[in-house]
Image (cartoon, rainbow, N blue to C red):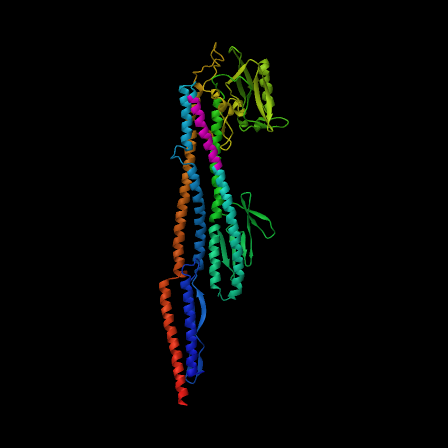
């Protein structure tokens, strides 16, 4: 074809091609703020030439392809760093909550409450019989108990919050992998092997970015254009048109195989993304902090009770004394079943019986190998004779050791080297065995006269069994526990030093998460800028192209007009 018709045909291809270029440019402008959108451009090429007598002559222009400016390598690097960033972000936000729980800038901090508790014992030592001092001690001990319990419940609540986050995150992951598998199918159908499904690819990459925010992944594109996605631990999540789900069960994340089998994914298997961050907080941070708080509470209860059990209140107990720690009822009641049963050792204790006029009778009981409460009961009864009775009181499926003085007698205790009184909860200050169960012994809250500020004289000839309202020996011994090294979770430390070390560890961990988040966020920003320099839409650049295409379109329209004029000239020549 040549002549006027050829000019008209060339003009037509130019007009349509420039119009298509304007459409692609308009699409870029419209999506300048669309997350995950990659800039597109129409690639033009000359139409096939036709042969004339003088040689080859062009026949116009056509669109070869609409290409996408997309840096796959840089996008993968961004997604990798996004997983790291969001993992630190999840840990960072959770550690803010933990730091708040251990805030020592207020008067309600555990460290300050411990100090007030020890100070109350000093005050009681200055006035052992003082009602006000005893009430103050109980009040401060109550605040300390409440704070321990609050720490326990708040940490458990944070663990529950992690479960909620994990559940919601897994739902999102399963939804995203399903959508990506669907897009794989659409891309395969639309691409036809030439990579034409630009917008579908952008949509899929945007979903992959969201998936990377939730967990660390590896992915690659196969020949058909579909993505295969796996977790960093090798669990496949998407393959062409199939997706595999995750499941949360009892606080643990599982990958569900094709056969329906559950494979556990620990925090080590999922280290990045929000999922990895939440798992790390739930499985590592919270248990570690809670273990240390429980160690502190367990040792605190043990040491205070051990010392308190050696002392004497304002008067002996006038009725039966029942331990606050019990053992599950069975054929026997093994001492090892007590919360502090492992502390019981060979030794002896003294039980003092006072008649109506205050005359004391000393009963010495030796532990030569007690295994069960029944063993202890037998030896105590042998020592007491007619002055009292030891028995096992059963309530709520547990057995508690009870010592009942004979009628007209009252009872006190001293010089326990067996730790049995502390283990049984007899003549003790606290009940419980960790931060969640700690409580004031009801014997103390019911009658503050039972606070053992003094001791029974067990060594002075002529004064054996004597006690005094002004005796402060046990109160001062309890106050001195503040500065003594004791066993706390296998470490030798004072209560203050152990707690301060815990607060310091929490601060260091939080700062590490903050630094990790800041660094990874900067990396994401830098890599995103590099990616966007290739994929991002520049309005200035698009406006320049739009002007070029408009001018070319106008020129093509002018060609059509010229062709029409040429045709009219030929027609008028007839």
Quarter where residue 5 is shown = bottom left
For the point 40% across and 88% down, the residue is 572
| In the depicted structure, whether residue 534 falls above or below residue 502 | below
Q: Find out whether residue 145 is within the magenta segment.
A: yes
For the point 53% across and 64% down, the residue is 189
For the point 56% across and 28% down, the residue is 338
Location of residue 24 in the rendering, given as x and y in whole percent from the top left corner: 43, 67
Residue 269 visible, this orientation = no
Quarter containing the N terminus: bottom left
Location of residue 502 in the rendering, given as x and y in whole percent from the top left corner: 43, 35
Viewer-proximal residue, 202 or 262?
A: 202
Residue 133 visible, this orientation = yes
| In the depicted structure, whether residue 547 falls above or below residue 428 | below
* Residue sticking out furthest to the bottom: 574
Viewer-proximal residue, 53 or 414?
A: 414
Viewer-proximal residue, 466 or 346?
A: 466
Quarter where residue 40 is shown = bottom left
Quarter containing the C terminus: bottom left
| In the depicted structure, whether residue 425 falls above or below residue 285 | above
Q: Which secondary structure class fits the magenta region best?
A: helix
**Range of residues picked out in magenta:** 132-153
Q: Find out whether residue 183 is within the magenta segment.
A: no
Location of residue 182 in the rendering, given as x and y in whole percent from the top left corner: 54, 59
């Amino acid at each position: 074809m040549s002549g006027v018709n050829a000019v008209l045909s060339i003009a037509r291809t130019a007009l349509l091609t420039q119009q298509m270029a304007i459409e692609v440019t308009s699409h870029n402008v419209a999506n300048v703020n669309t997350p995950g959108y990659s800039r597109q451009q129409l690639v033009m090429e000359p139409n096939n030439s036709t042969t004339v007598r003088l040689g080859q002559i062009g026949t116009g222009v056509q669109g070869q392809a609409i290409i996408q400016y997309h840096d796959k390598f840089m996008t993968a690097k961004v997604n990798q760093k996004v997983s790291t960033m969001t993992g630190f972000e999840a840990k960072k936000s959770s550690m803010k909550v933990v730091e708040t729980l251990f805030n020592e800038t207020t008067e309600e901090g555990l460290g300050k409450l411990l100090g007030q508790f020890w100070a109350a014992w000093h005050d009681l030592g200055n006035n052992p019989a003082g009602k006000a001092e005893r009430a103050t001690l109980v009040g401060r001990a109550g605040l300390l108990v409440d704070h321990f319990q609050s720490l326990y419940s708040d940490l458990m609540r944070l663990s529950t919050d992690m479960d909620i986050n994990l559940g919601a995150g897994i739902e999102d992951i399963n939804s995203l992998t399903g959508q990506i598998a669907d897009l794989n199918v659409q891309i395969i159908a639309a691409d036809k092997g030439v990579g034409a499904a630009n917008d579908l690819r952008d949509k899929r990459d945007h979903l992959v970015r969201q998936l990377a925010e939730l967990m660390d992944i590896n992915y690659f594109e196969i020949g058909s254009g579909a993505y295969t996605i796996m977790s960093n631990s090798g669990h496949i999540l998407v393959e062409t048109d199939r997706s595999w789900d995750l499941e949360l069960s009892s606080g643990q994340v599982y990958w569900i195989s094709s056969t329906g089998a559950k494979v556990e994914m620990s925090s080590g298997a999922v280290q990045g993304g929000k999922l990895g961050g939440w798992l790390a907080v739930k499985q590592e941070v919270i248990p570690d902090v809670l273990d240390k708080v429980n160690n502190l509470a367990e040792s605190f209860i043990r040491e205070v009770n051990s010392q308190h059990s050696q002392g004497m209140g304002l008067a002996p107990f006038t009725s039966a004394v029942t331990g606050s720690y019990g053992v599950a009822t069975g054929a026997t009641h093994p001492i090892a079943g007590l919360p502090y049963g492992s502390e019981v050792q060979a030794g002896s204790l003294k039980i003092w019986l006072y008649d109506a006029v205050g005359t004391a009778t000393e009963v010495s009981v030796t532990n030569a190998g007690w295994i069960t409460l029944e063993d202890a009961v037998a030896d105590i009864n042998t020592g007491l004779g007619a002055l009292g009775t030891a028995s096992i009181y059963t309530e709520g499926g547990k057995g508690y050791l009870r010592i009942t003085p004979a009628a007209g007698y009252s009872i006190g205790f001293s010089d326990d080297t067996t730790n049995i009184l502390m283990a049984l909860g007899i003549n003790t200050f606290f009940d419980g065995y960790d931060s969640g169960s700690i409580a004031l012994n009801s014997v103390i809250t019911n009658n503050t006269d039972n606070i053992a500020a003094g001791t029974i004289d067990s060594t002075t000839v002529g004064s054996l069994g004597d006690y005094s309202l002004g005796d402060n020996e046990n109160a001062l011994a309890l106050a001195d526990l503040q500065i003594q090294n004791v066993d706390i979770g296998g470490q030798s430390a004072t209560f203050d030093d152990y707690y301060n070390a815990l607060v310091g560890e929490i601060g260091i961990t939080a700062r590490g998460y903050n630094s990790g988040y800041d660094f990874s966020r900067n990396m994401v920003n830098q890599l995103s800028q590099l990616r966007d320099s290739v994929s991002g839409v520049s309005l200035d650049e698009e406006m320049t192209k739009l002007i070029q295409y408009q001018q070319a379109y106008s020129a093509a329209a002018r060609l059509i007009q010229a062709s029409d004029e040429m045709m009219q000239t030929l027609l008028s020549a007839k």
